[in-house]
Image: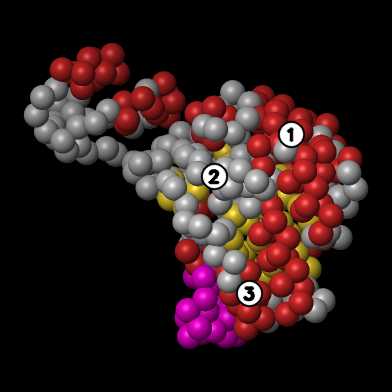
Amino acid sequence: MKKYSTAKLAQKIETLETPFYSIDIPDTESVMKENSEWFKVDLPRKVIRHKKKPDWLRVKLPIGPKYAKLRKLVDDNNLHTICTSGSCPNMGECWGEGTATFMILGNICTRSCKFCGVKTGRPLPVDWEEAEKVAKSIQIMQIKHAVLTSVDRDDLKEDMGSKFWVATIKKIRELNPGITLEALIPDFQGIHEHIDRIVNIKPEVISHNIETTRRLTREVRVQAKYDRSLDVLKYMKDTGQRRTKSGIMLGLGETKDEVIETIHDLHDAKVDIVTIGQYLQPSKKHLQVQRFVTPDEFLEYKELGENLGFKHFESSALVRSSYKARKHIN
């Protein structure tokens, strides 16, 4: 197979008119970092060598009687959870602890974040029956702690979906007395009136993910703003929310110093809980993984977070936003 230097390869791609199989993209970390643009070139057919996942990203199949029972309930009742649709690596562990994650306000998002597997487009009208469907799903699964999240609904100019959030939380509590909740909310464009609705309904935890570092925000989150997310988090704490939470993905091209800066920014925004995990590419259309962060580096961030005094700080490759969510209420 013919090989090219990085400069030659870039030039070759620009002039190529036929499908190619003869170009061997150098499989090194530096090339991946410096030339991620190449993978966005629209070619008739192409072969790209993806990095092999390291051993620490291997996931054990979910086991245990609690998981098996819940899986049967989900399948038999055609229930929909983010845990199953997103193939979460921690599904067995979370379900075993009586925790599950549900998405509301449909499955089409008005934003186009380059890391997210949710479909982008014009959402359907709000289905107000969805609130009861979610509440009944939680009841059937006998969930003790539910995490709610939603697509962004910038199309709903009046409230951006915040009123539906309130209706859903009320219905869940009505059908599931004693349940605890985490609301993983969008930024609502930073509009306090909409955020207030969520704070006033008093979920045990409200989370909003910063997702990545300041430098990468425009590329990764597109319509979102780094400082706006920080403002949302700080505003919720300042207005009386007991527990606030945020999450960061690593492996998108950030530097260690940038991650440390983001952790400090979240601390300054009075965030109580932080989750940090490895980004994994949902499909070939999404941003590629630039590197696989080592367990030792994740441990460094965990030690930093604990030293800064966060209430909880989860940091390892397979951590996701709702990982260990039930313990975060304390």
Say if the magenta span includes residue 124: no
The image quarter containing residue 14 is top left
Residue 213 at x, y percent in the picture: 62, 30
- Position of residue 203 relative to residue 20, above or below, is below
Q: Helix, strand, or loop for circle 2? A: loop
- At 29% from the left and 39% from the top, the residue drawn is 49
Say if the magenta span includes residue 67: yes
Instruction: Mark 3 or mark 1: name the one nearer the start of the chain.
Output: 3
Residue 27 at x, y percent in the picture: 33, 32
The image quarter containing residue 276 is top right
Instruction: Mark 2 or mark 1: name the one nearer the start of the chain.
Output: 2
Q: Helix, strand, or loop for circle 3? A: helix
Residue 242 at x, y percent in the picture: 88, 52
- At 14% from the left and 22% from the top, the residue drawn is 16
- At 55% from the left and 59% from the top, the residue drawn is 126
Mark 1 belongs to which amino acid?
A: Leu
Q: Which residue is mark 2?
A: 155
Query: Furthest-front residue in view?
Result: 158
Asked if residue 250 lies left or right of residue 97, the reply is left
Q: Which residue is mark 3?
A: 132
Highlighted magenta segment, given as a residue range? 58-81
The image quarter containing residue 308 is top right
Looking at the rendered image, the disc whose residue lies closer to the viewer, 3 or 1, is 3
